[in-house]
């Protein structure tokens, strides 16, 4: 079993959510200001009454994904501001829920995470970035199919950062499908063992180079795992698509090439019908898809174990088999449709 629980709380009152409008801009609308003030006060009283009435009424909804994975939607009967003062009751509720339902992971909503942390809540951040990396093959398949080409037609260059655990699973996913691959790295000697393994397993001879500028000239797909502080001095192949996996990177300086910073996706209809609509008020699609798929693979909780080849393969295959669909990409400034990505080789 690989069950998990998603914890949310009561919404804050309108008084704390609504931005105050400067009086100078509403000086001619006194009635509206008075009405808004009264509405906020009534909303605040209503929420306080709701907290009082449901002081120990912890709401739990059970959503069965399959025989091995169940989601428990746990709604705390307090606003985020008051959760810390109710820690004892929450802990008792949470531990009972965990023990009675064999729950592997407890994940707090973003609103709760900002206010409090519990011993039983996950240290891993399910933000969709791991899913984005694990779906490199799915991503490229969507782009290639739309451009009537194959992944094997692409000249792929990977800009290696300092993190081998991110590089190796991506490299092993791509190597059975690619014919031309180059890794730009300052640590050629340290990567030779992995490169020899790839050659023995797939017959692909991966090139290693330190020459960033030369390697980028012919690449049609550039996978960036590094920060690249001098990116504005580099010249990419004008037709290249850049897949950026470095969150801290300033995308504004990354040339005029098509830039992908993330994916947009849709859930399979059958799964969507099972989910409570309220779930998307606190967790976006990428976060939730990553959480569901990781638990279906029965992943190890240790973060360093996530970046294993078999986990990447399982996520990629489960995504396709379950009926998830990549519908677009997060670009430099806006969302890109799959049709917007043009690969000319």
Image (tube, rainbow, N blue to C red):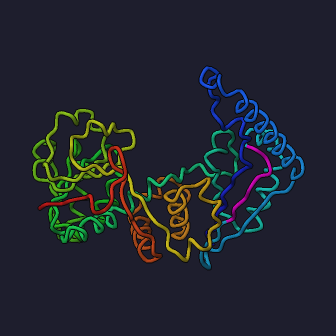
Q: Is residue 53 above or below residue 61?
A: above
| Residue 288 position in % (x across, y down) | 55, 60
| Residue 52 position in % (x across, y down) | 89, 47
Quadrant housing the C terminus: bottom left
| Residue 172 position in % (x across, y down) | 30, 64
Question: Per the image, is 35 magenta?
Answer: no
Q: Of helix, strand and loop, which mostly describes the magenta segment?
A: strand
Front position in the image: 179 or 141? 141
Residue appearing at x 47%, y 58% in the figure: 305
Apparent side of residue 20 relative to residue 190 in the rendered image (left or right):
right
Q: Quadrant of residue 229?
A: top left
Front position in the image: 342 or 25? 25
Q: Work out which residue is located at the far front of the displayed protein and give it.
A: 28
Residue appearing at x 22%, y 36% in the figure: 231
| Residue 16 position in % (x across, y down) | 70, 35
Quadrant housing the N terminus: bottom right
The tally of labels here is: 0
Q: Which residues are magenta?
A: 72-79
């Amino acid at each position: 079993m690989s069950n998990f629980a998603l914890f949310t709380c009561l919404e804050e009152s309108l008084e704390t959510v609504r931005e105050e409008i400067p009086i100078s801009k509403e000086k001619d609308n006194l009635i509206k200001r008075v009405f808004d003030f009264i509405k906020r006060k009534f909303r605040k009283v209503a929420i306080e009454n709701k907290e009082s009435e449901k002081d120990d009424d912890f709401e739990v909804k059970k959503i069965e994904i399959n025989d091995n994975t169940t989601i428990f939607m746990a709604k705390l009967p307090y606003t985020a501001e008051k959760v810390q003062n109710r820690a004892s009751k929450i802990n008792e509720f949470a531990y009972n829920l965990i023990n009675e339902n064999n729950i592997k992971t407890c994940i707090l909503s973003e609103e709760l995470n900002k206010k409090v942390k519990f011993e039983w809540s996950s240290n891993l951040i399910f933000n969709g970035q791991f899913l984005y990396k694990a779906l490199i093959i799915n991503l490229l398949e969507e782009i290639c199919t739309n451009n009537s080409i194959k992944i094997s037609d692409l000249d792929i260059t990977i800009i290696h950062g300092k993190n081998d655990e991110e590089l190796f699973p991506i490299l092993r996913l791509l190597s059975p499908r690619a014919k031309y691959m180059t890794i730009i790295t300052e640590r050629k000697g340290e990567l030779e063992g992995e490169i020899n393994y790839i050659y023995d397993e797939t017959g692909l001879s991966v090139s290693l180079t330190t020459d960033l500028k030369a390697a980028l000239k012919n690449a049609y797909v550039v996978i960036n795992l590094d920060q690249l502080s001098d990116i504005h001095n580099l010249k990419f192949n004008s037709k290249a698509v850049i897949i950026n996996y470095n969150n801290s990177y300033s995308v504004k300086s990354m040339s005029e090439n098509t830039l992908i910073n993330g994916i947009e996706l849709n859930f399979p209809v059958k799964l969507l019908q099972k989910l409570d609509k309220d779930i998307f008020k606190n967790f976006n699609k990428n976060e939730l898809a990553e959480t569901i798929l990781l638990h279906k693979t029965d992943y190890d909780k240790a973060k360093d174990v996530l970046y294993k080849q078999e986990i990447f393969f399982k996520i990629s295959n489960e995504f396709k088999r379950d009926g998830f669909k990549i519908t677009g990409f997060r670009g430099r400034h806006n969302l890109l449709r799959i049709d917007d990505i043009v690969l000319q080789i």
